[in-house]
């Protein structure tokens, strides 16, 4: 079983950047498709970005295209989410998750979840 731990969240102003990291332990991440989700106050958890095992496929929620970038370093057992030009609507708890599928974009496709890291975008 893989354990996931997110880091890198914080309070930033609109237009700022953050890089979230998701470190895995217990198993190698190269066996899993990975995703970043977020849950804003009063809303359902939604997929933000996803990446296949070999990084040949990525997916982004429409509202983050061109601003967010997902990447992975299988040698470091870590997945990243680079977030640029952050907006107040990006405020949420961000979670990373692991899937047995290479093309997973649904919550139900993911078996392992981190505890989340808070991102707050406010002036």
Image (cartoon, rainbow, N blue to C red):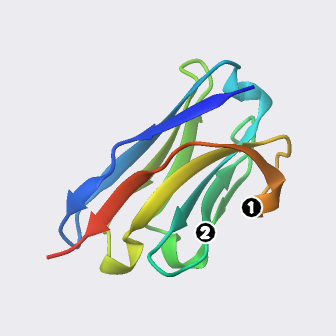
- Give the image location of residue 82, x and y in percent: 42, 51
The residue positioned 54% from the left and 80% from the top of the image is 43
Q: Is residue 16 above or below residue 99?
A: below
- Give the image location of residue 59, x and y in percent: 68, 61
Secondary structure of the residue carrying numbered label 1: helix
Q: Does residue 105 show up?
A: no
The residue positioned 74% from the left and 50% from the top of the image is 57
Q: Which mark is residue 79?
A: none
Closer-to-camera residue (6/62): 6
Is the N terminus in the top left, top right, bottom left or bottom right quadrant? top right
Q: Which mark is residue 107?
A: 1
Q: Does residue 99 show up?
A: yes
Count the marks. Answer: 2
Quadrant of the rendered structure where residue 89 is? Answer: bottom left
Crowding around mark 1 (Cα neighbors within 10 Å: few <14, some 14 to 19, many 20+) is some
The residue positioned 51% from the left and 45% from the top of the image is 115
Q: Earlier in the sequence, mark 2 or mark 1?
A: 2
Secondary structure of the residue carrying numbered label 2: loop
Closer-to-camera residue (76/107): 107
Q: Is residue 71 left or right of residue 106?
A: left
Quadrant of the rendered structure where residue 87 is? Answer: bottom left
> Are the residues tagged 2 and 1 within 8 Å (C-beta)?
yes
Is the C terminus in the top left, top right, bottom left or bottom right quadrant? bottom left
Crowding around mark 2 (Cα neighbors within 10 Å: few <14, some 14 to 19, many 20+) is some
Q: Which mark is residue 45?
A: 2
Compute the Cα span from label 2 to label 1. Answer: 8 Å
The residue positioned 58% from the left and 47% from the top of the image is 96
Closer-to-camera residue (37/82): 37
């Amino acid at each position: 079983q893989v354990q996931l731990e997110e880091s890198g969240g914080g309070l930033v102003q609109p237009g700022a950047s953050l890089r979230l990291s998701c470190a895995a332990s217990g198993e190698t991440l190269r066996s899993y498709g990975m995703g970043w989700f977020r849950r804003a106050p009063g809303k359902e958890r939604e997929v933000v970005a996803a990446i296949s095992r070999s990084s040949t496929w990525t997916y982004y929620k429409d509202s983050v295209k061109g601003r967010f970038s997902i990447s992975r370093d299988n040698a470091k057992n870590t997945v990243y989410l680079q977030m640029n030009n952050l907006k107040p609507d990006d405020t949420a708890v961000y979670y990373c998750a692991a899937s047995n599928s290479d093309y997973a974009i649904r919550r139900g496709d993911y078996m392992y979840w981190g505890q989340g890291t808070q991102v707050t975008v406010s002036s």
